[in-house]
Image (tube, rainbow, N blue to C red):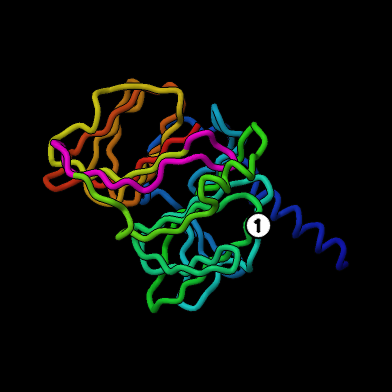
Amino acid sequence: MKPIFLTITALACFLAQAQQGSITSKVFAWNDLIVEKDSSTYFMKVANGPTATLSNLNIRVIELDPGKTHHSSLAYVDAEELIIVKEGNLKVTVKGNSTIIGPGGVALIMPGDDHSFENTGKALAVYYVLRFNTHTPKYIERGNQAGGSFVGDWENWSVQENEKGERRGVFDRFTALFMKMEMHVTSLNAGLVSHSPHKHPQEEIILVRKGDALVLLGDTTRAAGAGDLIFFASGTLHSIKNAGAGPLEYFALQFQ
């Protein structure tokens, strides 16, 4: 009976991790996410599937209780992983070096680098995990020359004021999988639009930290708020407007 049980278990795991269809432009609303549980953590599936430029994009939210570890130290051979902390504090260990980051903290993990995540605080840690696979082969040396894996907290981001609000630069660099990956945080004043409607070949991910947004997706508009994740597929006409009375704050990530 044991081999049958193992086979069923393996099949169940495979089905649980199976890809969805191709990911298209969409607002993934925080309130629509369903909390599930595996053996050690609670998680929410956001998206999992190919895009116009990626062989696969897997996005999840992890909820980690105090004292818990998401997984033992591991390394992905052909994937890069981006972590964005929403709530609590998270201890990120990469190649034996540990850094604790709080809300707004970011970690970028290169292929082949051992890493683990642990909640060393006294409150729940909540963070987004974005895992990228590309059609092109990895280039480890390019990623290492650009700085390798990277961990930084909210206070590390340099702030520049502009006529629409503020911009915090997170990183703009080569990676092992991408010729360019750029991430910043925009703080947009009430009633303003970040850019006029536009489109570009790079795919883009927006993660709303606070405020209320009105998002143009092609020929439709959608509301978005804190915790929501927005995916702009390659070539999609898009723009973001602050639809609230206070600042709209969001991470913006582009890759190519």
Horizontally, is 148 left or right of 18 in the view?
Answer: left
Examine the rendering and report whether any part of residue 14 can be seen: yes
| Residue 149 on the magenta segment | no
| Residue picked out by circle 1 | 75
Name the amino acid, label 1.
Ala
On the image, the x and y values in percent for residue 235 come to 43, 21
User: Which residue lies at the image location 60% right of the left edge and 64% below the top edge?
Assistant: 95
Query: Residue 13's quadrant in the figure?
Result: bottom right
184 w.r.t. 151: above or below: above
Q: Residue at image x 32%, y 25%? A: 220
Q: Nearer the viewer, residue 154 or 156?
A: 156
Question: What x and y, as percent, mark residue 6?
Answer: 81, 62
- Most foreground residue, 11 or 236: 236
135 with respect to 59 (left or right): right
Q: How many marks?
A: 1
Asked if residue 178 is positioned above or below residue 5 in the image, the reply reads above
Q: Name the quadrant of the N terminus.
A: bottom right
Point out residue 198 in the picture as x, y percentages from the top left corner.
32, 22
Q: Is residue 178 magenta?
A: yes
- The residue lying at 45 percent from left, 76 percent from top is 120
- Quick check: 18 left or right of 5? left
| Residue 153 rendering spot, x and y as whole percentages | 36, 60
The residue segment tinted magenta is 161-180
Taking the image as drawn, is residue 60 in sight? no
Local crowd size for mark 1, using a 10 Å CA cut-off: few (<14), some (14–19), many (≥20): some
Name which quarter of the figure residue 26 lies in. Answer: top left
